[in-house]
Amino acid sequence: MVKPSMLRSLHSAATRGVSHLSRRGYASEPGPERKVAVLGAAGGIGQPLSLLMKLNPLVSSLSLYDIAGTPGVAADVSHINTRSKVPPIYPLNRIILLCVFLFRIIDFAVFLRGALYSVVVKLRALCSAAFCVPICGFLGKIEALMWFDLRYRVIIVAGYQGEEELGKALEGADVVIIPAGVPRKPGMTRDDLFNINAGIVKALCTAISKYCPHALVNMISNPVNSTVPIAAEVFKKAGTYDEKRLFGVTTLDVVRAKTFYAGKANVPVDGVNVPVVGGHAGITILPLFSQATPKANLDDDVIKALTKRTQDGGTEVVEAKAGKGSATLSMAYAGALFADACLKGLNGVPDVVECSFVQSTVTELPFFASKVRLGKNGVEEVLGLGPLSDFEKQGLESLKGELKSSIEKGIKFANQ
Ligand SMILES: NC(=O)c1ccc[n+]([C@@H]2O[C@H](COP(=O)([O-])OP(=O)(O)OC[C@H]3O[C@@H](n4cnc5c(N)ncnc54)[C@H](O)[C@@H]3O)[C@@H](O)[C@H]2O)c1
Ligand SMILES: O=C(O)C[C@H](O)C(=O)O
C-alpha cells in the first residue's frame, strides 16, 4: 500500500531535483499566459511529455496535436487538477453577478405570474419576458465567462487531430515541441528514420511558419542532426526564419551524461553538470567530462567508457525495448526540462543555460550543439566550448564529418 509519507518523500525528492516539473505551488507563481503545443502528442514521448507540461506552472494553455489519438490524450490530461488557483472576485464582477441574479429572479417571477394567472396576464408576462430574456441571455453569457474565469483557472488542454486541425493547434503558441515521427528499432541508425521523419518535420514546420512564426521550436524528431537544418530551410523559404528560435533538443544526452557520471564519480546526481556538445547521433554526441562538476578524479579509461555509454545511450534503450521503440519516458523528462528552460527564458528569468543543437559559429559547422543562454527571444548567446582535454579534442575532430553530412542531407532535402 502507498503510504502518505511515501508520497510526501517522493514529492520532496522530486521538488529538490526538478522543481517546475513536479511542484504544485502555482498560486505563488504568476507569469504571462503561455501556450505550448506538442506535435506528436499521442506518441510514446508525446503522452508523458504532455503530462509533464500539464504539471508545469508556466504553461497556461496546452495544445496537443497528432494525426490520431489526441482527443483521448487531451481528455485524460485535462482532468489533472493543476494550476487550479481561484483568483479573487473583483468588485465589478460582483456587481455584474448580482445584476444577473436579480434579472434571474425577475425572469422567474414573470414566468410564475404568467403560468398562474389569466391569458391577459400571460400575454403581459410574455411581453416582459421578451424584454428580460435577451438581457438575461446577454448577462448570462458574461456570467458564464466570468465563472469560467473564476472557477476554472486550470490549464486549458485541447486535443487536435488531423491536418485540418493543425492550424488551430498552433495558433498563438509560444513554444512548439515536436516529437512526431517514427522511432528506431534494433539495428537501425537514427539516419535510417530520415526518409519518413524528414517529410513529417517539413510539413509541420511549414504549418508553424504560417500559424505561429514567432514560436520557439523544440525539435525532438530524429535524426535531429538533419531535422533541425530541414526546419531552418523551411522557415527560410517562408521568410520566417529566426535562428534564435530553433532548437534541436539534446537534453537527453546531458541527462544521460549526468546520470552515468554521478554513478562513477559517486556524487549526488542532482548537483552534477556535464556539457554535451556536437550533435545527436552516435559519435556526434560529445560529452565534456573534463568540465563536469563536481570534479572527480576519474581514470582515462573510465572517461572513455562514460563517453561511449553516453553516445550509445539511445541504442541501449532501443535494444532493451527490443523492437518496441526508443527512449520515451527519459526523453519526455528531458524534453520537459528543455521546454521549461525556454519558457523561463521567455519570461525573463536570467541565466538560463542549457545545451542545444542550434545555428552556431562555435565550429565551422553551421549547426552545432553547445551551451546556449536562453532569453526573451530564444537564444540570447551561443556559448563556446571551453577548454577541452586531448581526448575531447580528438572526439570533436572525428564527429565533424558525420555531422556535416547529416546537416547537408537535411538542407538538400528541404530544398528539393
Ligand atoms: N531528440 C532525442 O533525444 C530523441 C529521443 C528519443 C526519441 N526521439 C525521436 O522522437 C520521435 C518520436 O518518438 P516516439 O517514441 O514518441 O515515437 P512514437 O511512434 O511512439 O510516436 C510518434 C507520434 O508521432 C505521430 N505522428 C506521425 N506523423 C505525424 C504527423 N505528420 N503529425 C503529427 N504527429 C505525427 C504518431 O501518430 C505518433 O503518435 C522519433 O523520431 C524518435 O527517434 C528523439
Ligand atoms: O536512440 C534513439 O533512436 C532515440 C533517441 O535519439 C535517443 O537518444 O534515445
Image: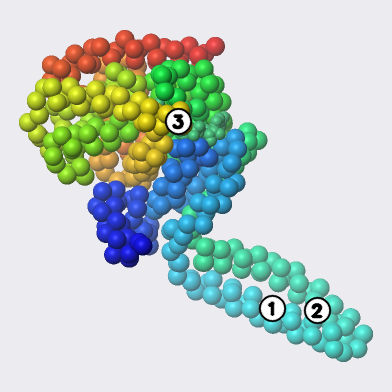
The residue that appears at 64% across and 75% down in the rendered structure is 100
Residue at the far bottom in the pictured view: 117
> Which residue matches tag 1?
104
Q: Residue 387 in the image: x percent, y percent?
A: 13, 23
Crowding near the residue tagged with mark 2, few <14, some 14–19, many ≥20 C-alpha atoms within 10 Å = some
Q: Mark 3 against mark 1, which lies toward the viewer? A: 3
Crowding near the residue tagged with mark 3, few <14, some 14–19, many ≥20 C-alpha atoms within 10 Å = some
Give the vertical position of 160 relative to 241 (above or below).
Answer: below
> Which residue matches tag 2?
128
- The answer to whether 412 appears left or right of 66 in the picture is left
- Marks 2/3 in contact by CB < 8 Å: the verdict is no
> Which residue matches tag 3?
325
* Mark 1 within 8 Å of ligand 1, using the beta carbon: no
Give the vertical position of 47 relative to 120 (above or below).
Answer: above
The secondary structure type at the circle numbered 1 is helix
Q: Earlier in the sequence, mark 2 or mark 3?
A: 2
Q: Quadrant of the C terminus?
A: top right
The residue that appears at 74% across and 79% down in the rendered structure is 107
The secondary structure type at the circle numbered 2 is helix
* Mark 3 within 8 Å of ligand 1, using the beta carbon: yes
- The answer to whether 298 appears left or right of 378 in the picture is left
Q: Earlier in the sequence, mark 2 or mark 1?
A: 1
Q: Residue 322 falls in which quadrant of the image?
A: top left
Count numbered badges in the picture.
3
Query: Nearest the camera: 255 or 359?
Result: 255
The secondary structure type at the circle numbered 3 is loop
Q: Alpha-carbon distance for marks 3 and 1?
A: 58 Å
